[in-house]
Image: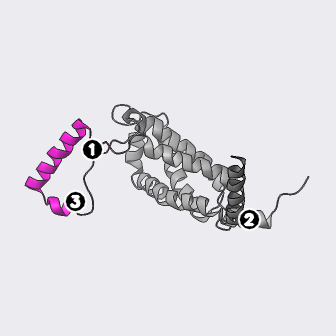
Amino acid sequence: MNALARAYYCIHEAIFPRLAHLDGLAPLAMRLYLVPVLWTAGNQKIANMESTIEWFGNPEWGLGLPAPALLAHLAAYTEAIGALLLLVGLAVRWVSVPLMITMAVAAITVHWANGWAAIADSSAQEVAIRLGEAKDILREHGNYRWLTEKGNFVVLNNGIEFAVTYFIMLLSLFFTGGGRYVSVDYYLSRLYPRSRV
């Protein structure tokens, strides 16, 4: 067992320290994944700000949040500006905080009541029945082949899955930063190194 552990450690040390100069690729991948998600969400809110404010504030069919105008603007511009900052890798740790708050609020106020899954399990009986009915209607009254040539129909469950996933990615970026070699933050840290006290 001791020889096996030593062999494992030797192989580990032969491979992974050599990959250290590529450790910026993981934060870059997370940033680039989040950019279109946040940019689209923010700009949709901005483009429809009046209806966004109404949705944020309405307790009957909306979120019923206090100060809906303020919160709608904060959410929309946090997402849009946050996407731009993540794209170039500037202030990544700083912008991760309000973006994590936005994801947490979205998970709790919008998605929590729907459970975990973003897309309903199509093997569940109730979901399968609804999908079957929808397909029958589309086959009879629509161009089903054209509608499904890019993918299958699903029932959106709208659970917390995506909001939590984005939160975890942002949490990781909070600790790693934008990434070595691939972010403005990296080059700023080289221009202005920490002073030693």
Q: Amino acid at mark 1?
A: Ser
In-front residue for pair 148/49: 148
In-front residue for pair 91/169: 169
Q: Disc 3 marks which residue?
A: 148
- The tag earlier along the polypeptide, 2 or 3, is 3
| 179 sits to left or right of 65 | right
Residue 118 higher or lower than 185, as above or below: above
Q: Dot 2 surroundings within 10 Å: few (below 14), some, or many (20 or more)?
A: few
Q: Amino acid at mark 3?
A: Thr
Residue 148 located within the stretch drawn in magenta: yes
Mark 1 and mark 2 in contact (Cβ < 8 Å)? no
- The tag earlier along the polypeptide, 2 or 1, is 1
Look at the numbered disc 2 and give the secondary structure of its residue. helix
- The tag earlier along the polypeptide, 3 or 1, is 1
Q: Which of the two marks, 2 or 1, is nearer to us in this view?
A: 1
Look at the numbered disc 3 and give the secondary structure of its residue. helix
- Extent of the magenta region: 120-149
Look at the numbered disc 1 and give the secondary structure of its residue. loop
Q: Disc 2 marks which residue?
A: 188
Q: Disc 1 marks which residue?
A: 122
Where on the picture, by quarter, is residue 26? bottom right
Q: Is residue 14 visible?
A: yes
**What colour scheme governs how the chains and residues are painted in the rendered image of this protein?**
one colour
In percent of the image, x 51 and y 52: which residue is there?
A: 79
Q: Amino acid at mark 2?
A: Leu
Mark 3 and mark 2 in contact (Cβ < 8 Å)? no
Q: Is residue 84 visible?
A: no
Give coordinates of residue 92: x percent, y percent: 64, 56
CA distance separating discs 2 and 3: 48 Å
